[in-house]
Image (cartoon, helix red, strand yellow):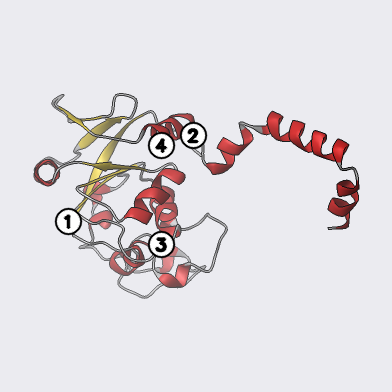
């Protein structure tokens, strides 16, 4: 998992409440569990004028010129600004996969659906909670100033606006530790690899018949 320390990025404003996971990555793209290739289909039904299907070449699609991510001023955005209850709906982990693979590193919103919120941390995506008033002001500034960027400093737990104003945010210490170290569940397990190998060696020494059972499987 990619580490998250300090990130400065262009902001894209998604001015909708209750954006659900089916909007983030529609159901027809959930057949794959390869964890790759979902970026082109992020917000597919809003992003394109024609219906999409798995394996389709994005170059053959008809982009919706009114959709925020298709507007030239937001090309290359890596921070998504959203309204309350972002990521509601079903618990598909494909949603943070698609956001990450599009190029987003952080999301800023007043609130999130719980499962989506947890899945973001497990996939290197930082969901930041700010007040509705703070988020509203960021929306206003992103609309007025083309090329509007923010800096997210996870270690200090602040969002830094272009003029230097800092907006503090909370993050659970263990989640912060994992993001700073680039540690997903597998990475955390591998940190204990020496202990795991020692346990396996001791277990086989005490119960050698288990080696034959393991080989038979």
Is 143 drawn above or below residue 66 in the view shown? above
Real-space CA distance between mark 4 and mark 2, rounded to the nearest whole angstrom: 10 Å
Judging by the rendered image, the residue that carries numbered circle 2 is: 182
Q: Nearer the viewer, mark 3 or mark 2?
A: 3
Judging by the rendered image, the residue that carries numbered circle 3 is: 91
Q: Tell me which label, 4 or 2, sits earlier in the chain.
A: 4
Judging by the rendered image, the residue that carries numbered circle 1 is: 15
Real-space CA distance between mark 1 and mark 3, rounded to the nearest whole angstrom: 22 Å
Real-space CA distance between mark 3 and mark 4, rounded to the nearest whole angstrom: 19 Å
Judging by the rendered image, the residue that carries numbered circle 4 is: 175
Q: Tell me which label, 1 or 3, sits earlier in the chain.
A: 1
Q: Secondary structure at mark 4?
A: helix
Real-space CA distance between mark 1 and mark 2, rounded to the nearest whole angstrom: 30 Å
Residue farthest toward the front in the current orientation of the protein? 206
Callout 1 touching callout 2 (CB < 8 Å): no
In the rendering, at what x and y percent does residue 120 appear?
39, 48
């Amino acid at each position: 998992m990619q580490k998250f320390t300090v990130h400065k990025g262009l902001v894209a404003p998604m001015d909708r409440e209750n954006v659900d996971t089916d909007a983030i990555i529609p159901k027809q793209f959930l057949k794959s569990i390869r964890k790759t290739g979902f970026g082109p289909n992020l917000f597919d039904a809003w992003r394109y004028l024609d219906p999409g299907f798995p394996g389709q070449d994005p170059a053959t699609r008809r982009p919706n010129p009114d959709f925020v991510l298709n507007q030239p001023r937001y090309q290359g955005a890596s921070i998504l600004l959203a309204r309350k209850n972002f990521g509601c709906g079903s618990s598909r982990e494909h949603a943070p996969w698609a956001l990450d693979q599009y190029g987003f590193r952080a999301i800023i919103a007043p609130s999130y659906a719980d499962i989506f919120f947890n899945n973001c941390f497990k996939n290197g995506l930082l969901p930041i909670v700010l007040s509705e008033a703070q988020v509203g002001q960021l929306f206003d500034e992103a609309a007025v100033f083309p090329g509007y960027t923010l800096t997210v400093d996870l270690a200090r737990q602040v969002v830094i606006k272009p003029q230097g104003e800092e907006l503090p945010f909370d993050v659970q210490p263990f989640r912060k530790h994992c993001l700073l170290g680039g540690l997903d569940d597998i990475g955390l397990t591998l940190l204990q690899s020496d202990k795991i190998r020692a346990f396996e060696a001791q277990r086989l020494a005490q119960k050698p018949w288990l080696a034959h059972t393991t080989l038979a499987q």
